[in-house]
Image (spheres, helix red, strand yellow):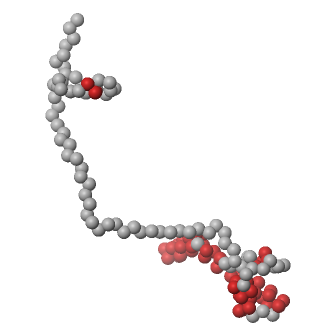
Amino acid sequence: MRKLFTYIVISLYLLGSTEAYQLLKIGYLVEHYFEHKDANDLSLVEFIDVHYIQPSVVDADYAEDMKLPFKSHKDCQAQIIQFAKLPTNDFFIDVPYIETNTEISAYNSPFTGTQYLDEIFQPPRSCARVLVC
């Protein structure tokens, strides 16, 4: 059951995204060949030469000729997958060392700059200050 499902998915992918859907027109190729064989007594090699090797001629059955496989292309997509080879040299990104203080202190340093005064989120202030009116 898995193999059947896999085959169906792969077939749908190939028919939908590549030119493999043109293979479904092979029945029309055989039918068109027999029409030409009955009308003009063409061999298979002459039929392929007229329809695929020589330039297309606009004649009475031009619309039927364009229905042959690999004569016209619709929604042709190009899918390219590229693999980049990474450099073999080792490279390092220097991360700056930031010393963090894990102590929580209520002391408000007098050396704290004034750049924080205009910000919405300001550093905590010490509890030692008491407003005297």
| Location of residue 125 in the rendering, given as x and y in whole percent from the top left corner | 22, 23
Which quadrant of the figure has residue 129?
top left
Residue in the image at 75% along x and 94% along y: 43
Camera-nearest residue between 23 and 56: 56
| Location of residue 12 in the rendering, given as x and y in whole percent from the top left corner | 58, 71
Residue 106 can be seen in this image = no
Which quadrant of the figure has residue 133?
top left
In screen coordinates, is 6 left or right of 120? right
In screen coordinates, is 110 left or right of 119? left
Residue in the image at 82% along x and 79% along y: 59
Residue in the image at 16% along x and 28% along y: 105
| Location of residue 75 in the rendering, given as x and y in whole percent from the top left corner | 64, 67
Camera-nearest residue between 117 and 22: 117
Camera-nearest residue between 51 and 35: 51
Residue in the image at 71% along x and 92% along y: 45
Location of residue 89 with respect to 7 vertically, above or below? above
In screen coordinates, is 98 left or right of 83? left
| Location of residue 80 in the rendering, given as x and y in whole percent from the top left corner | 50, 69
Residue 118 can be seen in this image = yes
